[in-house]
Image: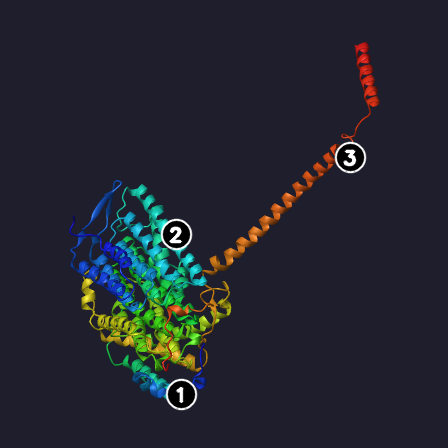
Amino acid sequence: MPDVFPISLIFFFGAALLLLLPKGHLRAALLLIVPILAGTMLWNLPAGNLWTATIMGFDLEFMRVDKLSRLFGLIFCVAAFLGNLYAWHVRDTIQQVAALLYAGSAIGAVFAGDLISLFFYWEGTAIASVFLIWARRTEGAYHTGMRYLIVQIASGVILLAGAAVFYGETGSITFEKMTLGSLGTWLIFIAFGIKCAFPLMHNWLQDSYPAATVTGTVVLSAFTTKLAVYALARGFPGTEILIYIGAIMTLFPIFYAVIENDLRRVLAYSLNNQLGFMVVGVGIGTELALNGTAAHAFAHILYKALLFMSVGAVLFRTGTAKGSELGGLYKTMPLTMIFCVIGAASISAFPLFSGFISKSLILSAASHDGYYVVWAILLFASAGVFHHSGIKIPYFAFFAHDSGLRPKEAPTHMLLAMGLTAFLCIAVGVYPIPLYEMLPFEIDYVPYTTTHVITQLQLLFFSALAFAVLMRTGIYPPELKSVNLDSDVVYRWFLPRLIAKIATGVARVWNAKTSFWITRYNNVVRGLYHTHGPEGRMARAWPTGSMVIWLAVLLGISLLINFVS
Amino acid sequence: MSNSPKTNPNDDPSTYPLLGRMMLWTDKKKNVDWIVRGLYAICTALFLADFVYYKKVYLGMEKIPGFYAMYGFFMCAALVICARGMRVFLKRDEEFYAPHDVESEEFPDDQLEKVDYNA
């Protein structure tokens, strides 16, 4: 019996045990104990390949522990704990089991040292997480979940195909740094890219996260995309194309976020934008950049969860997360508002908040390595994210025009979860050294310099100034009940209609061809009926006399032939 | 869904949580004007700060006084104006994709705890 076992098993056993417990506080407590247990175990594990198994001739590594995987594993445990605390009130078995299986699969994938076990956990995250969307139990959520599942499963299938081709090319299934070039590596790269919401593969994220349950979205926000970032950091560090992909990812979602009405979708767009920073870091691939990616993923999971929690609390109390229907909630939900502002300050990278000490690592890496245009894009995206996540979310939910809604403050457990997350966001921002020490590489970086603090404050306050000026001049687009077309219009609107048009065309050709042959067939039948039917010539009852005549004629012809021959 | 405060007889600001009551001043336009003036003052101070300390930066453009300030302001203004323009092409009705889409359907009440503060 080995001393160490895959940490994911704690979550899977926890999910099984949960089913045996009665609904209520016991289950909710188990949901908190499992990530604490897993995190404690993980904290104390030594580095190395701690658990391997040989299955059908393949050496599968289920517990590859190093600084990178440990950091992601730990923050996943923290996220699972905070998400489950936030969901203390939930009595839905499906959501509770899904949350555990999802977190367990994500953590299992982080520690997978080979492509086969990575694939299994990869698909595990897809299958478990979709139940957090379906648990909303509405027709819209069902269809959104199906779309989400198809995309996620496709990512897994492409990963499996990539792993198989990669094995054929190299004879290895070890999941380590790869060089993009062969078919196998490209397939694996695309599989990671789908889960990481690369441009044009991104819309599953904005489609599904606002469709999940109040608590489901908080859990969803932590794992899938950051697992993909981890996979990219592990498999493709220093792959230059990622720099440009990441730069585009930081850029286009901020435009959508400005005009989006559903605040949870605004957060999904800003999540996409933040992933872009991490992808740029992976693409640059230097120690500073990879440290930046890891640190930013850590900080991001916390502040993004906090933002989703606060908007979720608003949804929980009012029944809507649409900016057009909210406003003035600070009056009766002041604590939720404060936590939302802390999350907003963190994502905007205000000094003393977590984003400040993580995002700057990536920006510094971009400028140090000569990617000036990318640096300028990242700077723009930093200002943009403050604009929509930092100002828009708190402003339209809690201030702006008074909606007249007077909901009660969020329940205690939600406030506790938000409070803890907010504390971590500030703690990481104020004292980043413990986080820096956990990063994959040695780091010599001082975030709090006069220049950095002042330039960052200039960027943010002048962005706020732009917001204030645009609001007061009426240029800022109002929140409207609407949807905005994104790349999903291709598969949600265009392709179904194209297929319908093609189907109509094919049906028309088929009908024309069928009717042509049916007409011909009918003519033949009619002709046969005409000649052979009851009234037909061939069916007529001929008299005996005429038969004798014809016999005489035939006899005469044969005699004539005999005579002539 | 939204009930105007004017038509809500239960709406009594004196019963709001202490924190909420402490911030009620933000509702008055006069005070919002003061907030904006404060923002102007902070921005001015931050802009001028560039002249009074040694700016340790890597790129030439960063050395321009107020570079980050101008970049933040103009890029954000451009962002909003572009996004507003995008809305002309991208905005659709909430039922554009389907009559029962998550946009247009209500969140199930049994998964919520909608409690009015004054209830």
Q: Relative to B35, does residue A373 appear above or below in the rendering?
A: above
Q: Residue at point 51% right, 58% down?
A: A494
Q: Relative to A380, does residue A466 appear above or below in the rendering?
A: below
Name the residue type under label 2: Ala
Residue A37 placement: quadrant: bottom left
Q: How many marks?
A: 3
Name the front one of labels 2 and 1: 2
In the rendering, at what x and y percent does residue A61 appear? 23, 48
Name the front one of labels 3 and 2: 3
Residue with the mark numbered 1: B29
In the rendering, at what x and y percent does residue B84 appear? 46, 72
Residue with the mark numbered 2: A154
10 Å neighbourhood of mark 2: few (<14), some, or many (≥20)? Answer: some
Q: Subunit of mark 2?
A: A
Check contact, mark 2 vs mark 1: CB within 8 A. no
Residue with the mark numbered 3: A535
* Residue lying at the far bottom of the rendered structure: B30
Work out whether disc 2 and disc 1 sit on a shared chain.
no
Name the residue type under label 3: Glu
Seen from the viewer's position, the closer of residues A330 and A478 is A330
- CA gap between label 1 and label 3 equals 99 Å
Q: Subunit of mark 1?
A: B
Work out whether disc 3 and disc 2 sit on a shared chain.
yes
Q: Relative to A189, does residue B42 appear above or below in the rendering?
A: below
Name the front one of labels 1 and 3: 3
- CA gap between label 2 and label 1 equals 53 Å
In the rendering, at what x and y percent does residue B115 appear? 37, 77
Name the residue type under label 1: Lys
